[in-house]
Image (cartoon, grey):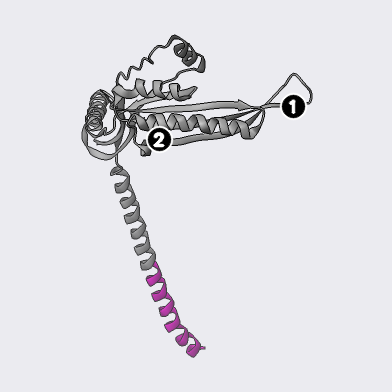
Amino acid sequence: MNNSLSLSRPNLRWLAGGLAVGLLAASMMGSGVATTQAQSSTDADETLRTLDVDGVGRVNAVPDVADVSIGVVKQDKEAGGASSKAAAAMDSVVTALLAMGIDEKDIQTTNLSLNPRYDWNQDPAPIVAWEANNMVSVTVRDIDAVRDVVDSATDAGANQINGISFRVEDPTEAQMLARSSAVADARAKADQLAGDAGVTIIGIVTITESGGQQPQPIYMARNEMAMMDSAGASTPVMPGEVELSVNVHIQYEIE
């Protein structure tokens, strides 16, 4: 009996030692959680505070290039006949443009189509004609020559002007001015918002930019062209100015 009791004492001492180690480990683990919580609290305090603002800058410039959409539309009872008529007319138009000094690389086909025309008064509607459409885009690098280009094209057989768009060939300088204006606009808004909100701007986090030229299109209907043709009038073309705009989105850091 005494031997059994004496043999159990070392086991009791070992158990007590194990409990002590376990309690120490638990104590250390508890300390680690507290440290983590404290760190998380610190991170929360250091969250970046920002103010997002959009700015716009606009600059007007005199255009030096025009893009003119010129076309011919021809009809015939046969598909081949319509295509042949349109091709012949466009060939005459292109020849006239080249004779004016327009570079061949500045003439590009933009549409070539052939469609049936139906008589919807009958059921079923029969095909009564075919319509061929041939369009080219002409880049005119001399603004003063735009009206002559239009007149020469119509004299050569063009019966459709889908539009004239003016632009600046090299917008770099104007875009730089618009960009500076956009940034200044954004900063003025940010300063007002920060002042009203009682915060201070201490830096910039991000800047993004978008924008570009806004071409000024002029459209001419087919009946207007016919009226000018019959009157023998020269086509009035006013290039005016084009607007170049830059938009910026700036994220400011505040405190």
Q: Where 50 sits versus 230, above or below? A: below
Q: Amino acid at mark 2?
A: Ile
Badge 2 or badge 1: first in the primary sequence = 2
Residue drawn 40% across and 29% down? 96
On the question of residue 159 being in view, the answer is yes
Q: Is residue 105 left or right of residue 169?
A: right
- Tell whether label 1 touches label 2 (CB within 8 Å): no
Q: Amino acid at mark 1?
A: Pro
Which residue is more in the foreground, 152 or 238? 152
Residue drawn 72% across and 21% down? 120
**Could you say whether the residue bearing mark 2 is in a helix, strand or loop?**
strand
Residue underneath mark 1: 126
Residues in magenta, as a range: 1-23
Residue 17: say if magenta: yes
Q: Position of residue 63 (x, y in %)?
A: 29, 25
Q: In the rendering, which numbered label is found on residue 107?
A: 2
Residue lying farthest bottom?
3
Work out which quarter of the rendered image holds the C terminus and state it: top left
